Structures are given as C-alpha cells and as structure tokens.
Image (cartoon, rainbow, N blue to C red):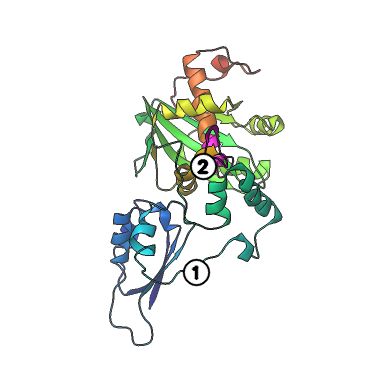
Amino acid sequence: MLFVPVVASSGEPAERIKSLTDVTDMWFEEPTELTYNEYLQIIRRLRGGDLTEAYAQRMHTLNPIDQRHWLKTKIFDAGKGDWQHYTYRDNQYVTAEEIDELEELKDVDYKQYQVYALGEWGALKDRIYNNYEVREFDFKPADWDDIIAGVDFGFEHPSAWLLLGIKEKTVFIIDEIYERKKTNPELIELIKDKQSHWGVRPPTYCDTAEPARIEEMEQNGLLVYPANKNVSEGINIVLSHKLVIHPRCVRTIKEIQSYRRREDRAGNILETPVKFLDDAMDAMRYGLATHRHVATQETAYPYEYDYQDEFSGEGKF
C-alpha cells in the first residue's frame, strides 16, 4: 500500500508522481488550486494490483470557494464519494485572533463569511484580478527589465514578501514568503535567504504602517523603501499588466483567486477590496505600484527617500 499526499500546486504535481506505481491512497490538500485536467492526470496514478484488505481512495480537504468550480460541478454535485462539513468552530487549534477575523467578515462581506467561516459553496463574483495565469517559467535575471519585491508586514496576519520580474507589460511572480508570527529579524533572514537563493538584491517596497521595521531592514542590508499605499491607484496599475504566477507561489495563487471587491448586504458592489486573505495581494500591489512611480516619475514622490539617487531604475541585478 502506498499513500501519496498531494499539496496542490498547479502544473507540477502530476509530473512529480508520474513514476509512482501501486498508489492506493491519495490526500489532496487545497485541490481548488488544480485545473480539472491536472486532477485527472494525478488520479490516473491511483492504480496497482487488487487490494484484499482495503480499497483505493481519494481524500480532499478544501474551502469550497466557488460554486462554479469543477470540484462542485463534476464531483460534489455528481454525488461522488462522501463529504464531511466542518467550520472553524470544529477546529480546536484555531486562535482567538483567527476567530475574530472570520467573525468580522459577517459585517464586512457576507459572501466571504459564507465561504470561509461557514464553509459553504459561494459565488465569488466581482473578482478583482482576472489578468493572470499560473504556469512554470525559468528564472533568469537577464530576461527581465526589472526585478523588484514587495512586503506586507504582519504577525497575527501573515507577513508576505513577493519577488517580481517585470518584462514590458508582463509581471512574473517568481517566489513568495508567507509566514505568520515572524519577528522582524526572522523575516529579514527569510528574505535574505530568498535573495541569496535567486542571486538578487532587489529594491523592496514595504508597508509603511511600521516605519521602524523598514529602518531595521535597511540597517540589515536590505534595499528597502516605503510603498505607495493608494489602493485604487495600485489596483489599476496591477490591472494594466499581465500576471504570470509560478506554481510554487501557492499562497499568492490562493489569494488572487478570491480577491474581490466588497459587497454590502443589499448586493451593491463597492470600490474597496475585502480586507481578508489579501496579504500577498498587498505585497504585490506595493511593489508594482510604487516601482511604476519610481520608474516613470509621473508624480513627485511624497516620501523622505530620494529614489533616483538610491536606485537607478535600470533593473540590472
């Protein structure tokens, strides 16, 4: 008997397990991040000789995000298998902060509350970003015009760091850090490890809510600057690009799939995005929107740093 856990990561899982034989059990964590064709490729590996004491099976653990998703239409609605429904109230490890965050959704956006707190199939319309695809690509610094990064600070919320490669009007999301309860020194070390791994030292645009953290990062050798946090302007700048997300950026993929504008109880769509599962989205927006200001110098930049002196904007790393 061979058990294979599958952590969903679009484009890669089927390739990783092609050589396996006699797989009898599979557990899919977050299968919502797989396409239906990828899912079919993976389950074809569920094969082997006849079992005398058990039977081949697939297990899935997920948030039922979108009622149009293939998991609902092709499996759930088709009555395939047995389903068990749990919410955060059944999770003995959920923290008080996480409970408060989920409960607040009830008044912020009821559709999100139904999905993430009550575990119901939802219709997450008015998604903000549809200008993206998930696929693998090779990382070569010389291929891009610029390489930058964005940081959204957190502690109870995750701290998020995204490494972005820019080529004309296409942004490649290369790698991510997405960690809860990390102190600033711990986050700095994680960022340095990523920079060392990829051989880059990019300008990094940071959440301005905690300027002391930016200063500490600068003192530790990171090339950091405060970010432009204008939300609507930043979203429009992101929308003006095509986004290509590498499958390794699992949390970024999950966030972008559900990142949407607020809807009030009357069903009116508001301009502001829902403040939930948005840490990677903020980091991406900080990086791209601020870099656009620096590169084009369309407006005088209202921060204490002289960007033109500290960063040439040539994007050669």
Tally the numbered discs.
2
Q: Nearer the viewer, residue 258 or 149?
A: 258
Residue 202 visible in this rendered orientation of the protein: no
* The N terminus, quarter of image: bottom left
Which dot marks residue 194? 2
* The C terminus, quarter of image: top left
Report x, y in % for residue 69: 38, 53
Give the structural element (helix, strand or loop) at label 1. loop
Report x, y in % for residue 311: 53, 20
60 to the left or right of 229 = left
- Distance Cα–Cα, label 1 vs label 2: 39 Å
Which dot marks residue 49? none
Residue 8 position (above or below residue 305)? below
**Location of residue 270 (image quadrant):** top right
Q: Nearer the viewer, residue 180 or 236?
A: 236
Report x, y in % for residue 197: 48, 42
Residue 66 visible in this rendered orientation of the protein: yes
Q: Dot 1, crowdedness within 10 Å: few (<14), some or many (≥20)?
A: few
Residue 145 position (above or below residue 269)? above
Q: Which residues are magenta?
A: 264-283
**Amino acid type, label 2:** Lys
Looking at the rendered image, the disc whose residue lies closer to the viewer, 1 or 2, is: 1
Q: Residue at coordinates 49% horizontally, 47% vertically from top-left?
A: 251
Give the structural element (helix, strand or loop) at label 2. helix
- Residue at the far front: name it: 266
Q: Nearer the viewer, residue 93 or 260?
A: 260
Task: Say whether residue 277 is magenta.
Answer: yes
